[in-house]
Image: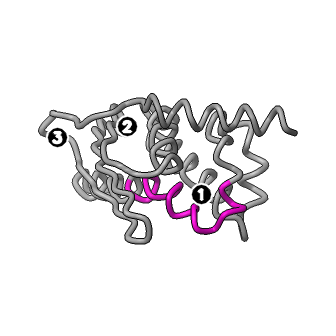
Amino acid sequence: MDDLEDLYREIILDHYKHPRNQGVLDDPDAIREEGFNPLCGDEIKLSILVKGDRLADIRVDGHGCSISRSSASLMSEAVKGKDLAEVDRIIERFKAMVVGGEGAAEGLDSLRTLGELAALQGVVKFPVRVKCATLPWNSLQNALATARARGGE
């Protein structure tokens, strides 16, 4: 188990130090969403580009702790290029995994489908950090709601 925890720790630190999909989309059709955690000051600026039923591109900017920044980086890699229904499923599985409680078993059963996102499963042990891990995911859900409203769904 120590090897697995070490691997997860390495994944989190790598995404914190070298965040993927960093920046802001310049496309005028991009949807921007900001998230803020008043408890710790984490702030995320998310921009997404939806084309048809696909999340064509995503960029993340902002500042925060290692958990929120690595969660945003991991999220961007997990959802970029996916169809929106799949993005919704990934969001549900991830949140069930880190929030625990009802639906957690399904989230844990889905670890093999979550790939590197499983590195954040240990957050469930630290309730104060759950908001850090879910901040980018909640921002993505809000951005997707805006995209769907624009698309008339």
Q: Is residue 147 magenta?
A: no
**15 or 76: which is nearer to us?**
15
- Report the amino acid beneath label 2: Leu
Left or right of 26? Residue 40 is right
In space, the residues marked 1 and 3 are separated at their CA atoms by: 28 Å
- Report the amino acid beneath label 1: Lys
Q: Is residue 134 magenta?
A: yes
**86 or 31: which is nearer to us?**
31
Q: Which mark is residue 77?
A: none
- Residue at 29% across, 35% down: 51
Numbered disc in front, either 1 or 2: 1
The numbered mark, 1 or 3, whose residue comes first in the sequence reads: 3
**113 or 44: which is nearer to us?**
44
Residue denoted by label 1: 95
Other-residue count near label 2 (Cα within 10 Å), few / some / many at <14 / 14–19 / ≥20: many
Q: Which mark is residue 29?
A: 3
In space, the residues marked 1 and 2 are separated at their CA atoms by: 19 Å
Rendering coords of residue 34 (x, y %): 28, 57
Left or right of 50? Residue 66 is right
Rendering coords of residue 133 (x, y %): 53, 55
The numbered mark, 2 or 3, whose residue comes first in the sequence reads: 3
Residue denoted by label 2: 55
The chosen color scheme is: one colour
The range drawn in magenta is 123-139
Left or right of 141? Residue 105 is right
